[in-house]
Amino acid sequence: MREFIKRVKFYEKTVADAKANDIEDIDFELAEEKILFLKNSYKLNINLIEEVNKEIEKLQKKLILNHRAEMIIKEISTFEKYLKEKYDYDLVLKDEDENEDENEEEMFFIKIDLSEEMLEAILQLK
């Protein structure tokens, strides 16, 4: 971008010098229009770059959220396998649409099928 600005300033200086020296074979109005066009296109490019940067930031946020969601899913899956293998528990995620009335802070519950002996052992631990 700096190179572009330097070039436009060089064009402006060249046209100003040509006007000052009364060079006849140059269409000064056309030259000034082209310089104005270059300046406006520069402003448009800056605006486009800003818009592209905003879109890139949005995409980066979505990618970060997507990555976090994938990591949470992996952790839940690992935890679910651990519960199933170690304790024969089934981890069941709540469906938000069906359970709107229940406490929203609870994310999941564990379905437990324990024998009476295990229940007694757990109660004795408390």
Image (cartoon, grey):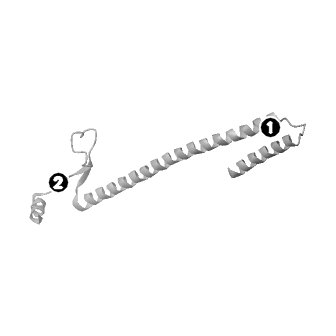
Q: Quadrant of the C terminus?
A: bottom left
Determine whether label 1 and label 2 are within 8 Å by CB. Answer: no
Nearer to us in this view, 50 or 95: 50
Which structural element holds mark 2?
A: loop
Q: Amino acid at mark 1?
A: Ala
Say which residue label 2 marks.
Answer: 113
Q: Quadrant of residue 40?
A: top right
**Image side of residue 53 versus residue 114, left or right:** right
Q: Amino acid at mark 2?
A: Asp
Query: Considering only order in the chain, which callout, 2 or 1, is on the residue closer to the N terminus?
Result: 1
In the image, residue 12 above or below residue 126? above
**Image side of residue 3 versus residue 72, left or right:** right
**Image side of residue 2 versus residue 77, left or right:** right
Say which residue label 1 marks.
Answer: 31
**Position of residue 80 measured from the top left corner of the image (x, y, whole percent):** 29, 56
In the image, residue 90 above or below residue 42? below
